[in-house]
C-alpha cells in the first residue's frame, strides 16, 4: 500500500516513510591527596559532573572531589607561574603521580620564580612562543589526508605531527619534510587511525534503515529511542547525513511500539529536540503531561507540530496488530515522522514519547498516537540524556 495514501485513511496507520521496512509496515517511517586538595565539598560541583568523573576516571567520591579541587588549584598556580617566568614559559601539565603542576621553563634562571608560585619545573630548549610559532607555520601548509594533525606537546617540548602509518605515501613524506624544516622542535609520530567527524544525536532528526526513513525520538546514554516498527533488533542505521550510525539493540512491535538504537563512535548523544526553526528544545526530564495539556512533536517529514493530549493508555489496532498504552493527540503527523519526539511542560523540556502512528495528515488535520518514553526507558534500562 502506498504510505502517503494509507496515512490519509480514517483508520490508524504507522508513520514510517518509504518502501517496505524490515517489518513490512506502512510507516510513519519514511523509506527514503594531591596538591591543594582543600575541602571536599561535593555541593561545589554539579551532580552530573561528579557522576561522569566517577564513571570515566574510575574514582570514588572522595577521590573525585580531591581531584577536582587539585585541578582548580593547578589552574591558579599555572597563571601565577606563567606571569612570573614571562617569555621563558614553555607550557605546563599536571603530574599524574603527584597531582602537582609542572611548568616547563626555557630559561633556567627563571625556574625559581615558577617554584615560588607553587609549581614544579622542568628545563627545556624551546619556549611556548617558539613552539606555537612553529605550529602556526605548519597551519599555513596544505596537508594530505594521510597526515592526521599536529599539536604543541608541552611534555616533550615539541610540535608533534601525526601521520597514518598505513597511508604514509609520497605526499605525506613531502609534507613531513617541509614541516620538519620549519623548526628542530618538530617531530613525527605514526598513528593507526585517522580521525573522523562526530555528529550529534538529536530528537526529531531523520535516520535511515536501508531505504526507509524514521525519526529520532530522544537521545539516551549510548544511543537513542524510537518506534519499534521502524526496525528489528540487529538492523543497522545511518544518520540524517547517511553516515553509519548504529544498530537496533532492542525492538518491540506489535504489542508495544518502541525500540532503541545503540550508536557508534561517530555520534554523540545530546539533550536536544529539533524545532525545525534553527533552534532546539533542551530536554531536562520526562514528567508525563495530563489529558488536555499542550504538547508538541518533532519529525523529519513535517517538522515541529503541536496539539493537545486527548487520552492516555489507548489501545490502537493497526493492520500489523494492536499496540496498547499509547497516548492520543490531535497533533498531525505523516510518513517519516515515526519514532520522533513528543515534548510538553515548561519550555517543552519534558520528554513525553515517540511517534507511533495515526490518521489524517498535516494538510487536513489528524490524530496521532505516541508511545510514552518512560516505559521505553524502563524496558531497556536506559538513561535519558538531559540538559
Image (cartoon, rainbow, N blue to C red):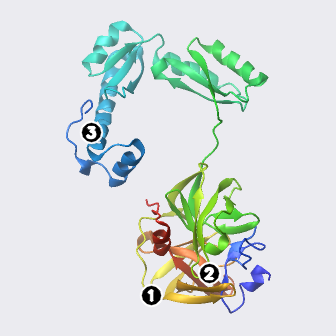
Check if mark 3's residue and mark 1's residue have beta carbons within 8 Å.
no
Q: Indicate which label's residue lies in the foreground, 1 or 2.
A: 2
Q: Whole-Å distance between the Cαs marked 1 and 2? A: 25 Å
Crowding at dot 1, Cα within 10 Å, few <14 / some 14-19 / many 20+, comes out as: some
**Left or right: residue 309 compared with residue 265:** left
Q: Which residue is mark 1?
A: 291
Is 386 located above or below residue 337 in the figure?
A: above
Crowding at dot 2, Cα within 10 Å, few <14 / some 14-19 / many 20+, comes out as: some
Percent x, y for residue 192? 64, 32
| Residue 285 shows in this picture | yes
Residue at 55% of width from left, 89% of height from top?
Answer: 315
| Residue 338 shows in this picture | no
Which quadrant would residue 211 be assigned to in this image?
bottom right
Which quadrant would residue 122 be assigned to in this image?
top left
Residue at 71% of width from left, 21% of height from top?
Answer: 175
Percent x, y for residue 139? 63, 26
Q: Earlier in the sequence, mark 3 or mark 1?
A: 3
Q: Which residue is mark 2?
A: 254
Is 21 located above or below residue 320 in the figure?
A: above
Percent x, y for residue 157? 48, 17
Residue at 38% of width from left, 43% of height from top?
Answer: 58
Residue at the outermost bottom position: 10
Secondary structure of residue under mark 3: helix
**Left or right: residue 229 compared with residue 58:** right
Image disc number at residue 66: 3
Amino acid at each position: 500500500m502506498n504510505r502517503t495514501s494509507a496515512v490519509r485513511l480514517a483508520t490508524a496507520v504507522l508513520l514510517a516513510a518509504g518502501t517496505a521496512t524490515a517489518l513490512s509496515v506502512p510507516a510513519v517511517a519514511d523509506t527514503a591527596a594531591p596538591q591543594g586538595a582543600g575541602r571536599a565539598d561535593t555541593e561545589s560541583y554539579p551532580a552530573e559532573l561528579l557522576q561522569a568523573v566517577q564513571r570515566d576516571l574510575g574514582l570514588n567520591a572522595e577521590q573525585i572531589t580531591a581531584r577536582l579541587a587539585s585541578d582548580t588549584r593547578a589552574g591558579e598556580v599555572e597563571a601565577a607561574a606563567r606571569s612570573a617566568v614571562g617569555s621563558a614559559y614553555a607550557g605546563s601539565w599536571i603530574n599524574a603521580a603527584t597531582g602537582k603542576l609542572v611548568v616547563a621553563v626555557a630559561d633556567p634562571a627563571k625556574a625559581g620564580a615558577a617554584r615560588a608560585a607553587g609549581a614544579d619545573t622542568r628545563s627545556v630548549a624551546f619556549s611556548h612562543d617558539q613552539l606555537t610559532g612553529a605550529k602556526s607555520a605548519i597551519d599555513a601548509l596544505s596537508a594530505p589526508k594521510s597526515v592526521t594533525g599536529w599539536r604543541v606537546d608541552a611534555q616533550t617540548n615539541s610540535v608533534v605531527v601525526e601521520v597514518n602509518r598505513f597511508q604514509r605515501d609520497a605526499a605525506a613524506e613531502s609534507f613531513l619534510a617541509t614541516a620538519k624544516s620549519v623548526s628542530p622542535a618538530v617531530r613525527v609520530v605514526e598513528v593507526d587511525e585517522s580521525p573522523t567527524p562526530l555528529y550529534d544525536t538529536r530528537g526529531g532528526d531523520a535516520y535511515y534503515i536501508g531505504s526507509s526513513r524514521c525519526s529520532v525520538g530522544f537521545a539516551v546514554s549510548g544511543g537513542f529511542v524510537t518506534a519499534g516498527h521502524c526496525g528489528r533488533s540487529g538492523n543497522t542505521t545511518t544518520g540524517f547525513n547517511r553516515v553509519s550510525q548504529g544498530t537496533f539493540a532492542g525492538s518491540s512491535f506489535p504489542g508495544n511500539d518502541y525500540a532503541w538504537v545503540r550508536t557508534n563512535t561517530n555520534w554523540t548523544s545530546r539533550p536536544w529536540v529539533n524545532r525545525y526553526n534553527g533552534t532546539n528544545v533542551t530536554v531536562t526530564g520526562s514528567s508525563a503531561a495530563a489529558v488536555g495539556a499542550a504538547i508538541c512533536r518533532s519529525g523529519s517529514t513535517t517538522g515541529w507540530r503541536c496539539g493537545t493530549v486527548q487520552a492516555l493508555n489507548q489501545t490502537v489496532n493497526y493492520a500489523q496488530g494492536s499496540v496498547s498504552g499509547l497516548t492520543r493527540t490531535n497533533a498531525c503527523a505523516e510518513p517519516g515522522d515515526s519514532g520522533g519526539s513528543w515534548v510538553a511542560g515548561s519550555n517543552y523540556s519534558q520528554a513525553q514519547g515517540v511517534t507511533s502512528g495515526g490518521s489524517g495528515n498535516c494538510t487536513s488535520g489528524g490524530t496521532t498516537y505516541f508511545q510514552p518514553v518512560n516505559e521505553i526507558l524502563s524496558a531497556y534500562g536506559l538513561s535519558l540524556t538531559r540538559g
